[in-house]
Image (spheres, coloured by chain):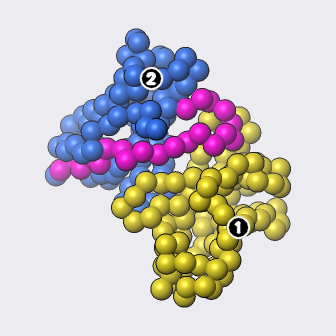
Amino acid sequence: EPEVTQTPSHQVTQMGQEVILRCVPISNHLYFYWYRQILGQKVEFLVSFYNNEISEKSEIFDDQFSVERPDGSNFTLKIRSTKLEDSAMYFCASSGQGDRFRYFGPGTRLTVT
Amino acid sequence: DAKTTQPPSMDCAEGRAANLPCNHSTISGNEYVYWYRQIHSQGPQYIIHGLKNNETNEMASLIITEDRKSSTLILPHATLRDTAVYYCIVRVDQTGANNLFFGTGTRLTVIP
Protein backbone atom coordinates (compact mmCIF):
# COMPACT_ATOMS: atom_id res chain seq x y z
CA GLU A 1 0.00 0.00 0.00
CA PRO A 2 1.37 3.44 -0.88
CA GLU A 3 2.45 5.59 2.04
CA VAL A 4 3.68 9.04 2.92
CA THR A 5 7.19 9.07 4.35
CA GLN A 6 8.86 11.70 6.50
CA THR A 7 12.44 12.37 7.51
CA PRO A 8 13.94 12.66 9.99
CA SER A 9 11.81 10.86 12.55
CA HIS A 10 13.28 13.04 15.30
CA GLN A 11 15.05 16.38 14.98
CA VAL A 12 16.67 18.22 17.85
CA THR A 13 17.69 21.80 17.29
CA GLN A 14 18.66 24.85 19.26
CA MET A 15 16.41 27.86 19.54
CA GLY A 16 16.99 30.28 16.68
CA GLN A 17 18.25 27.64 14.27
CA GLU A 18 16.61 26.84 10.95
CA VAL A 19 15.15 23.40 10.38
CA ILE A 20 13.80 21.69 7.30
CA LEU A 21 11.38 18.82 7.67
CA ARG A 22 11.04 16.57 4.67
CA CYS A 23 8.15 14.59 3.31
CA VAL A 24 7.70 12.33 0.31
CA PRO A 25 3.99 12.28 -0.53
CA ILE A 26 2.33 9.46 -2.43
CA SER A 27 3.57 9.69 -5.99
CA ASN A 28 0.46 10.63 -7.97
CA HIS A 29 -1.01 12.92 -5.31
CA LEU A 30 -1.64 16.58 -6.01
CA TYR A 31 -2.60 18.07 -2.65
CA PHE A 32 -0.11 18.36 0.18
CA TYR A 33 -0.50 19.43 3.78
CA TRP A 34 1.41 20.03 6.98
CA TYR A 35 -0.13 19.58 10.40
CA ARG A 36 1.42 19.78 13.82
CA GLN A 37 0.57 18.35 17.21
CA ILE A 38 2.03 19.76 20.38
CA LEU A 39 2.38 17.06 23.01
CA GLY A 40 -0.99 16.29 24.57
CA GLN A 41 -2.88 18.69 22.30
CA LYS A 42 -4.98 18.50 19.14
CA VAL A 43 -3.73 17.92 15.64
CA GLU A 44 -3.64 21.41 14.07
CA PHE A 45 -3.63 22.39 10.40
CA LEU A 46 -0.70 24.49 9.24
CA VAL A 47 -0.82 24.77 5.46
CA SER A 48 -2.09 23.19 2.27
CA PHE A 49 -0.29 23.26 -1.06
CA TYR A 50 -1.61 22.65 -4.55
CA ASN A 51 -0.33 23.40 -8.02
CA ASN A 52 2.96 24.70 -6.63
CA GLU A 53 1.46 27.28 -4.38
CA ILE A 54 -0.05 27.62 -0.94
CA SER A 55 -3.82 27.23 -1.14
CA GLU A 56 -4.60 27.81 2.52
CA LYS A 57 -2.71 28.48 5.72
CA SER A 58 -3.62 28.82 9.35
CA GLU A 59 -2.72 31.63 11.70
CA ILE A 60 0.01 29.40 13.10
CA PHE A 61 1.78 29.47 9.72
CA ASP A 62 3.47 32.85 10.11
CA ASP A 63 6.49 34.32 8.33
CA GLN A 64 8.82 31.92 10.13
CA PHE A 65 7.35 29.04 8.15
CA SER A 66 7.65 28.23 4.48
CA VAL A 67 6.88 25.24 2.28
CA GLU A 68 8.39 24.09 -0.94
CA ARG A 69 8.15 21.31 -3.43
CA PRO A 70 11.70 21.50 -4.75
CA ASP A 71 11.39 18.57 -7.13
CA GLY A 72 8.72 16.16 -8.24
CA SER A 73 8.76 14.10 -5.10
CA ASN A 74 9.69 16.03 -1.96
CA PHE A 75 7.56 18.44 0.04
CA THR A 76 9.38 20.40 2.72
CA LEU A 77 8.49 22.56 5.69
CA LYS A 78 11.10 25.09 6.77
CA ILE A 79 11.08 26.91 10.06
CA ARG A 80 13.44 29.83 9.77
CA SER A 81 14.25 30.61 13.37
CA THR A 82 12.90 28.00 15.74
CA LYS A 83 11.33 28.84 19.08
CA LEU A 84 10.77 26.61 22.08
CA GLU A 85 7.05 26.55 21.32
CA ASP A 86 7.72 25.01 17.90
CA SER A 87 8.48 21.74 19.66
CA ALA A 88 5.84 19.33 18.36
CA MET A 89 5.13 16.41 16.07
CA TYR A 90 4.85 17.58 12.48
CA PHE A 91 2.75 15.49 10.14
CA CYS A 92 2.77 15.67 6.39
CA ALA A 93 -0.29 14.48 4.46
CA SER A 94 -1.27 14.14 0.84
CA SER A 95 -4.35 13.40 -1.21
CA GLY A 96 -5.04 12.71 -4.84
CA GLN A 97 -7.52 14.23 -7.26
CA GLY A 98 -10.96 13.13 -6.15
CA ASP A 99 -9.69 11.58 -2.93
CA ARG A 100 -12.06 12.10 -0.07
CA PHE A 101 -9.50 11.46 2.62
CA ARG A 102 -5.90 12.23 3.43
CA TYR A 103 -2.94 9.96 3.87
CA PHE A 104 -0.75 11.02 6.77
CA GLY A 105 2.91 10.34 7.27
CA PRO A 106 4.39 8.98 10.51
CA GLY A 107 5.52 12.41 11.65
CA THR A 108 8.73 14.16 12.63
CA ARG A 109 9.23 14.94 16.28
CA LEU A 110 10.87 18.37 16.53
CA THR A 111 12.49 19.25 19.81
CA VAL A 112 13.74 22.81 20.24
CA THR A 113 16.13 23.33 23.15
CA ASP B 1 -16.16 25.78 17.25
CA ALA B 2 -16.48 22.00 17.79
CA LYS B 3 -19.04 20.49 15.46
CA THR B 4 -18.86 17.07 17.09
CA THR B 5 -19.08 15.75 20.63
CA GLN B 6 -17.39 12.52 21.65
CA PRO B 7 -16.81 10.88 25.03
CA PRO B 8 -13.22 11.47 26.12
CA SER B 9 -12.48 7.81 26.77
CA MET B 10 -13.86 4.28 26.49
CA ASP B 11 -12.69 0.79 27.27
CA CYS B 12 -13.46 -2.34 25.31
CA ALA B 13 -12.58 -5.98 25.93
CA GLU B 14 -10.42 -7.61 23.30
CA GLY B 15 -12.51 -9.54 20.79
CA ARG B 16 -15.68 -7.62 21.56
CA ALA B 17 -17.26 -4.95 19.41
CA ALA B 18 -16.23 -1.39 20.17
CA ASN B 19 -19.02 1.13 19.62
CA LEU B 20 -17.81 4.71 19.54
CA PRO B 21 -20.55 7.37 19.56
CA CYS B 22 -20.42 10.84 18.06
CA ASN B 23 -22.96 13.66 18.26
CA HIS B 24 -23.13 16.15 15.40
CA SER B 25 -26.49 17.80 15.91
CA THR B 26 -25.65 20.85 13.77
CA ILE B 27 -24.48 18.88 10.73
CA SER B 28 -25.43 20.45 7.40
CA GLY B 29 -27.02 18.58 4.53
CA ASN B 30 -23.81 18.57 2.48
CA GLU B 31 -21.48 17.54 5.31
CA TYR B 32 -20.10 14.06 5.58
CA VAL B 33 -19.12 12.22 8.75
CA TYR B 34 -15.49 11.11 8.72
CA TRP B 35 -13.62 8.95 11.20
CA TYR B 36 -9.87 8.96 11.64
CA ARG B 37 -7.76 7.40 14.37
CA GLN B 38 -4.34 8.12 15.81
CA ILE B 39 -2.33 5.32 17.34
CA HIS B 40 0.11 6.60 19.94
CA SER B 41 1.54 9.75 18.28
CA GLN B 42 1.59 8.22 14.81
CA GLY B 43 -0.02 10.11 11.96
CA PRO B 44 -3.82 10.07 11.82
CA GLN B 45 -5.26 7.22 9.79
CA TYR B 46 -8.47 7.39 7.79
CA ILE B 47 -11.05 4.78 8.78
CA ILE B 48 -14.37 5.42 7.07
CA HIS B 49 -16.81 8.11 6.04
CA GLY B 50 -20.48 8.44 5.12
CA LEU B 51 -23.23 10.88 4.26
CA LYS B 52 -26.48 9.27 5.34
CA ASN B 53 -26.34 5.59 4.55
CA ASN B 54 -24.58 3.11 6.78
CA GLU B 55 -21.15 2.19 5.49
CA THR B 56 -18.85 -0.77 6.02
CA ASN B 57 -15.29 -1.45 4.98
CA GLU B 58 -12.55 -3.82 6.05
CA MET B 59 -11.78 -1.76 9.12
CA ALA B 60 -15.13 -0.72 10.55
CA SER B 61 -18.81 0.04 10.13
CA LEU B 62 -20.41 3.46 10.36
CA ILE B 63 -24.00 3.78 11.47
CA ILE B 64 -25.59 7.20 10.92
CA THR B 65 -28.99 7.97 12.46
CA GLU B 66 -31.82 8.87 10.14
CA ASP B 67 -31.79 12.51 11.28
CA ARG B 68 -27.99 12.51 10.85
CA LYS B 69 -27.50 14.13 14.23
CA SER B 70 -25.37 11.31 15.56
CA SER B 71 -23.37 8.34 14.40
CA THR B 72 -21.56 5.31 15.78
CA LEU B 73 -18.31 3.80 14.63
CA ILE B 74 -18.21 0.07 15.17
CA LEU B 75 -15.04 -1.98 15.31
CA PRO B 76 -16.56 -5.46 15.17
CA HIS B 77 -13.81 -7.42 16.91
CA ALA B 78 -11.48 -5.05 18.73
CA THR B 79 -7.83 -6.04 19.06
CA LEU B 80 -5.09 -4.54 21.20
CA ARG B 81 -3.81 -2.76 18.08
CA ASP B 82 -7.06 -0.81 17.93
CA THR B 83 -6.08 1.11 21.06
CA ALA B 84 -5.98 4.68 19.78
CA VAL B 85 -7.65 8.07 19.81
CA TYR B 86 -10.64 8.08 17.45
CA TYR B 87 -11.74 11.34 15.84
CA CYS B 88 -15.19 12.00 14.44
CA ILE B 89 -15.10 14.90 11.99
CA VAL B 90 -17.86 16.47 9.93
CA ARG B 91 -16.86 18.23 6.75
CA VAL B 92 -18.00 19.17 3.30
CA ASP B 93 -16.66 16.61 0.89
CA GLN B 94 -14.31 18.77 -1.14
CA THR B 95 -10.98 17.54 -2.44
CA GLY B 96 -8.09 19.56 -1.09
CA ALA B 97 -10.21 21.79 1.09
CA ASN B 98 -8.81 22.56 4.45
CA ASN B 99 -11.82 21.54 6.45
CA LEU B 100 -10.35 18.57 8.27
CA PHE B 101 -10.39 19.80 11.87
CA PHE B 102 -9.39 17.40 14.60
CA GLY B 103 -11.01 17.68 18.00
CA THR B 104 -9.98 15.85 21.12
CA GLY B 105 -11.55 12.54 20.08
CA THR B 106 -12.26 9.41 22.11
CA ARG B 107 -9.35 7.51 23.59
CA LEU B 108 -10.26 3.83 23.14
CA THR B 109 -8.38 1.36 25.28
CA VAL B 110 -8.75 -2.30 24.32
CA ILE B 111 -8.24 -4.47 27.36
CA PRO B 112 -6.84 -8.00 27.09
- Read off the residue under disc 1: A63
Residue sitting at x 54%, y 88% = A14
Q: Which chain is blue?
A: B
Q: Which residues are magenta?
A: B91-111
Rendered shade, chain A: yellow
How many numbered circles does the render carry?
2
3D distance between C-alphas at marks 2 and 1: 35 Å
A42 vs B11: above or below: below
Amino acid type, callout 2: Thr
Tell me the subunit letter for badge 1. Answer: A
Compare residues A50 and B76 and report the one nearer the observer: A50
Q: Nearer the viewer, residue A102 or B105?
A: B105
Res A101 seen here = no
On screen, residue B20 above or below B108: above
Measured as percent of width and height from the top left, residue B63 is found at: 38, 22
| Residue type at the position of mark 1 | Asp
Q: Is residue A18 above or below residue A92?
A: below
Q: Quadrant of residue B60?
A: top left
Quadrant in the picture for residue A67: bottom right
